[in-house]
Amino acid sequence: MPRYFTDEHEWIDVEGESATVGITDYAQEQLGDIVFVELPDTGTQVEKGGEAAVVESVKAASDVYAPITGEIMETNSALEDDPALVNTSPEEEGWFFRMTIGDSSELEGLMDDKAYKTFVDSL
Amino acid sequence: MNGAPFWCVCLPATGTDDLSDEQTTEEAPPLEQLPLDAWHRAEGARMVPFAGYEMPIQYEGIVAEHEWTRTSASLFDVSHMGQLSISGENAAHELEKLVPGAVTSLKEGRMRYSMLLTEAGGVIDDLMITNAGPHIALVVNGATKWDDIAHLREHLPDHITLTHYDDQALLALQGPKAGEVLEALIPGAGELTFMRAGFFSWDGVPLWVSRAGYTGEDGFEISVHADHVSKLADALVADDRVRPAGLGARDSLRLEAGLPLYGHDLTTQIDPVSAGLTFALSKKRRDIGGWMGHQACLTRLTEGSPTVRVGLTLEGRMPAREGAKIFAGEEEVGIVTSGGFSPSLGHPIAMGYVKPAHAGDGAELEIEVRSKRLPATVSPMPFVPHRYFRGS
C-alpha cells in the first residue's frame, strides 16, 4: 500500500479506489498540542488544494488541504473525543478522513517517503 | 497544511492599531536576540519571532508548561519587555500627567498597574509602575517599548531623566511554588507580598525583584544584568520544582487569568473604562483630572461605553479566536479579541468586546467561527482564580 506525502505535510495512503489522509509527524510537532479537529462531513466533495479540515492547537487554527480531488467517505470519529491522537499517533490512529480518488493522475506529483524525508530535512 | 503560522500566538489583530505583536516577513526588521538565546536553544526551545525578538514559544509543549505553572513553578524569559526608569525633580508628579493611576502616593517598594493613554483615552500601552526609591521604575510591553519611550520623552519635561535599561534581562518565575523556590535561592525575597518590590543580592549579583507577573499565579519578576542572567536561569531550573516555559503557555495562562494582552485586548482604539480597567483609574484623580485622557475616560464613566470587555466560555472543544464576530440572535454585538483553549478548564474561553446590553454575566451569545455559530456564555473573569501572595 503506497503512502504519499504533500509539501503541506499531509500523508495519503492509497488502498485501491480510496485513500486515507492525515497529517505527518513533522506537522503535529510544529502545531503542538492539538485540542480540536474540525473534519468535513461525509459526502463532501473536496478539490486538490482546497480546504478539507481545520486543526486547532492551543496556539492557532491551521487549515488542512485536500491532497487530491475526491469525495469524503468517512472521518475518524475517534478525534472528536481525543484530538490529541493527532499528536500521539499522527500517521496511524490520528488519521483524518478516507476519500475517493477522483483523479489518480493527481497522485503522481506527490512525494514518496524518501522524498518527503529529504524535504523535511531541508526545512 | 496551511493557515496561521505555527508560531502565531494569536491570530492577526483586527483593529487599526499597528502595534501588534505580529511580524510580517516582508517588513520585519532584523530580529534581535535575547541575552538568554543560547540558553533557550540548549533547553530545547522552539524560537519564533515576537515583538522584534527571537523568543521561545515552547519547550516540551504548551499544555505541559501551562499545567506545570499552575501546579509548581515555571521560568519565563520576558527580557523583550522594556525596563525603563524616570528620575529627577517631581518625577512622580510629572509621570502622573501621563497615567490615570496615582504615582506620587505610591510608597517606596510598592508597584501599581497603569496605562499610558492618548488624549482620546486610547491605551498606548499598559505598564507596571514601581517606586524604586531613587527613581520610578516602569516595565512596558516589548512590542510597544520604542513608542512608549518616544511618548514619554515627548511629554515629560526636559529635566526628567528617562533611562532604558536595555542591558537588563527580565525573568518571570511563576507558580504556587515560586515563593519557596526563590526564598531558598535568595533569602528574604519570599517575604515580599503581591505588588511589592525590592533590591536583593544573589551570589554577588544585584537583582531587582518584584512579586508580580501575568499568569494569575503567585510569582516574581526578576531584573538582572544580561551578563548574569544565564547563571541565574541555571540556578532556578536546577531546582526540580522549576521548568522553563514559553510564550505559548504565558498566553494561555494570562487568558485564563482574565488579563488583557496589549495589541489584542487593549489598543489605542480602546479606553480603560471599556476595557473594564477602571480600578486603574485612581478615584481621587478621576475627579481632579490633570492626566492625559482624563476627559475621555470621564465621558465613558458617565455616559457608558459602546462596547465593554467581557469573558466568554464556550462548550465543546472548538476555540473562537481573535477577530471572530459575536452575535445575539441575528444582531452582531461584538468581537473576540483573544481566544483559545483553556488547558486548566478543558474547554475554550475567550475575551471580547460586546455591547453593554449583552455584557451581563450569564448572557447567552453566539460566536461565528468558520460560518458556524458556537454558543458562548458571558462569564466573570478571571476564568481561573488568581492566587497572589498577599501575606501569610
Image (tube, grey):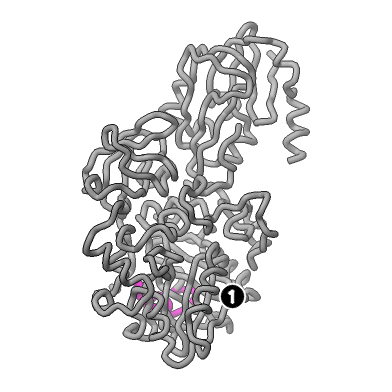
Q: Residue at x 43, y 75 (%)?
A: B210
- Residue B314, horizontal then vertical, whole percent: 33, 39
- Look at label 1 and name its amino acid: Gln
Q: Which residues are magenta?
A: B183-196
Viewer can see residue B4? yes
Question: Farthest bottom residue?
Answer: B89
Task: Between residue A35 and residue B271, name the one nearer to us.
Answer: B271
Quadrant in the picture for residue A65: top right
- Residue B331, horizontal then vertical, whole percent: 29, 36
Left or right: where does residue B3 sit relative to residue B28? left
Task: Between residue B62 and residue A55, name the one nearer to us.
Answer: A55
- Residue A106, horizontal then vertical, whole percent: 70, 15
In this picture, is B67 found above or below B94?
above
Left or right: where does residue A108 sit relative to residue A42? right
In this picture, is A38 found above or below B222?
above
Looking at the rendered structure, the secondary structure element under dot 1 is strand
**Which residue corresponds to mark 1?**
B168
Q: Quadrant of the N terminus of chain A?
A: top right
- Residue B122, horizontal then vertical, whole percent: 40, 63
